[in-house]
Image (cartoon, rainbow, N blue to C red):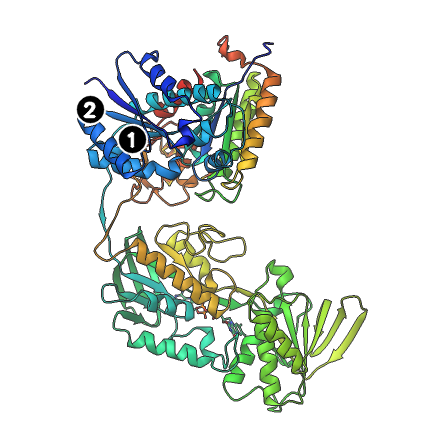
Amino acid sequence: MDKEFTPRIAAILCQWCSYTGADLAGTSRLQYPTSIIAMKVMCSSRVDPVLLLKAYLSGSDGVLLGGCHPGDCHYEVGNYHTRRRFAILKAVFDTLGLESARLKLSWISASEGPKFAQVANDYTEEIKKMGENPSKKKMFL
Amino acid sequence: MKAKIGIYVCECGPNIGETIDIPRVLETIPALEGYEDVELVPKSFGLLCSPAGKEYLAKEITDNGFTHLVVAACSPRDHNSTFIGVCKEAGLNPYLYKIINIREHCGWIIHDKEAATDKAIQYIRSGISRVLYQSELFERQLEITPDVLVIGGGIAGMEAALSLASHDRKVYLAEKTGELGGKAARFASLLPRQGRGADVIREKIKAVEENEHIRVHLNTELESSIGFLGNFEVVLAGNGDDEKTDLKVGAIIIATGYRMSDPGSFTGYEYADTDEVYSSLEIERMNGGEGIALRSGAKPASVALIHCVGRQEKGYCSRICCNYMMKIAGYFKKQSGATKVTEFFFDMCLPHKADQEFFDHSVGLGIDFKRVKEIGLSGTSVEFAETGGGKQKMDFDMVVLASAMEPSEDTEALAGLLEIDLDERGFFKEAHQTTDPVATSIDGIFVVGASQGPRGVSDSMLLAQATAGRIRCQLKPGGKIVPEVKVSEIMEAYCTGCRTCLEVCGYGAIYFDDQKGISIVNEAVCRGCGNCFGSCPSGALRTKHFTNKQLYREVTEALK
Ligand SMILES: Cc1cc2nc3c(=O)[nH]c(=O)nc-3n(C[C@H](O)[C@H](O)[C@H](O)COP(=O)(O)OP(=O)(O)OC[C@H]3O[C@@H](n4cnc5c(N)ncnc54)[C@H](O)[C@@H]3O)c2cc1C
Ligand code: SF4
Ligand code: SF4
Ligand code: FES
């Protein structure tokens, strides 16, 4: 494996909690790897499995989905639905023989800048160990 | 027409200027691959959010005739709305613009300037590609009525009505019974100060009755309600007659209060009707009337006051009982200083700043406080074990129970009618416990007083006043509201009518069209969360400004 491998991780974040948490990581000048590429949606419940799959197939070495903590979704129950949809997608990944570890769901509140940085750091390390997303090289679906 | 995109990088003083190599960003953009058909105009400016910056940007938009705009600056939370304003002023539809956060998400998190610059370019490229797929959206202004319906004429409802009524805002107050005031109208004294009790409530009742901008409907309940913030159509129905009143209101406040749970339903408190066992509310009534007496008419010589009845079973503390039980102890002492009063409690709840003082005062009156770990009744004999002690038994002339406050009897029906949620304890559920305690899941419907959870008079009034403030800001007389534009829509051709989206929408924003056999989004109610999108098995949903195309472009470009 390439020693210099810097993963790319698409981070799809809800605008109320997790995106704000990411902002706070910045405001607090916390350092986290360049691997994380943040994208904003209204609520994590907007994110259907296909969008995550799209990120994966576009070569994202890891896909991070961020939402508010359970019970804290700005739209009340959105993230409970997210949680279920995410679980299904993981199962689908496993069934297809894809690496479901390349998908991660994390609850990060608006005040959890340090947690965001932590998740970004840890997940980047994890993905580094896994190496590059194989779908970058070949389509196998 | 060939797209012409303005890309403005803000230096944000040293914040971006020193953390990102802006000249390199500006050099790289025109050379981006895949945008040969698009004119890209990258520039930078010192402080785009300053008055000079805004003026500059607006002029640039008009002079250059940009079709789209990308601003690479700070967090959208800081200045998205600033630049939306600039777009509007310059005549560019703000939905053709996007802010890219290269400060919090690049400059501030990466020490290495080169790496931060690479990342900024990556973000900007993804923003350019997204903005090309964005479409114009148009905000609509809706007329509103500032008038308000309050359901429930207890202290909370009356306070809300009084705080809202004015020459340009009518308040309709629907009370189920024949009189205003709620439970507290019968209390001889009101915490935290003994003394002036019912007077306070009576004054409020008078103020409500005399207020020409409040219309009180007694013996009246809500029959139906449809609509949304600014525009509800409601029907009130008399509960003794067939009288119906149709109203148009902009907001609805629920203030239906609480009721006492039946102590008999909790283990250890099974007693007969003939026993000298009373609920706290009955004592308040007696005290406000003939005085507190046994069935024989004699005054009790010894009384047990038992707190926390049903707290375990209900799973919550009723918050006000410890305080009012001390008040009731005071009633007995006032009636006869010789009365032996014993209070049994599990935990003493003294949440307000004057409560500790009140407790010390009660101890001073000679009231015996016993902290117990278990307790049970057999008639008026109390069997208990103090913390750290064994079982004991004491006989009393009278027993008073503070049983848990529970949601009032119509709560469930009302929630169904208004399509709002209840919490696990059966009270009306606030939009957010911590950050949005008076709103509900439906915009324009608020909940105040004890109908939202057990609380005392002052806290009930506090919520009422807070709600009034919210409504005054949201529904200004003569004003208009702009509903969310980034809403969802259902594409008729794809919808199979499975109704999954109806199930997941927490706002009742989707309805089913029986004739067409499909679901339809009510855009005035939709908040744009996109949960319905995530649920639709047929791909029939579209979330405006967060369409698949836009998000796919954003993600694929960012990953290039
Ligand atoms: C024994 C006892 C002593 C207390 N002492 C104190 C004290 O000293 N100080 C203190 O701060 N608090 C005290 N409290 C708490 C106090 O009673 C409440 O805080 C207060 O009554 C809450 O006011 P509310 O308006 O929310 O509810 P409520 O007083 O319950 O009023 C609700 C009103 O809504 C009406 N209503 C109900 N359903 C409908 C419907 N479907 N349609 C239309 N109208 C409806 C009811 O008829 C009633 O008029 C005490 C409570 C008890 C039990
Ligand atoms: S979930 Fe999709 S297909 Fe089903 S009713 Fe809603 S829009 Fe139509
Ligand atoms: S976007 Fe949210 S609020 Fe709007 S219809 Fe869908 S689920 Fe309901
Ligand atoms: S708004 Fe954050 S998960 Fe729904």
- Residue A56 point in image, percent of width and height: 49, 19
**Which dot, 1 or 2, sits closer to the camera?**
2
Q: Is residue B245 left or right of residue B378?
A: left
| Crowding at mark 1 (Cα within 10 Å: few <14, some 14-19, many 20+) | some
Residue at x-position 25% and y-position 63%: B169
- Residue B278 point in image, percent of width and height: 60, 78
Which residue is labeled 1 in the image?
Answer: B492
Q: How many marks?
A: 2
Residue type indicated by callout 1 = Glu
**In the rendered view of the protein, which quadrant contains the C terminus of chain B?**
top left
Find out whether the residues at labels 1 and 2 contact each other: C-beta distance under 8 Å.
no
SS for dot 1:
loop
Which residue is labeled 2 in the image?
Answer: B64
Where is B453 relative to B554, above or below?
Answer: below
- Residue B314 point in image, percent of width and height: 60, 60
**In the rendered view of the protein, which quadrant contains the N terminus of chain B?**
top left
* Chain letter for the residue marked with disc 1 in the picture: B
Residue type indicated by callout 2 = Asn
Is the CB of mark 2 within 8 Å of ligand 3? Answer: no
Where is B58 relative to A1, above or below?
Answer: below
Q: Nearer the viewer, residue B487 or B475?
A: B475
Cα–Cα gap, marks 1 and 2: 39 Å
- Residue B148 point in image, percent of width and height: 30, 61
Is the CB of mark 1 within 8 Å of ligand 2? Answer: no
* Chain letter for the residue marked with disc 2 in the picture: B
Q: Quadrant of residue A103?
A: top right
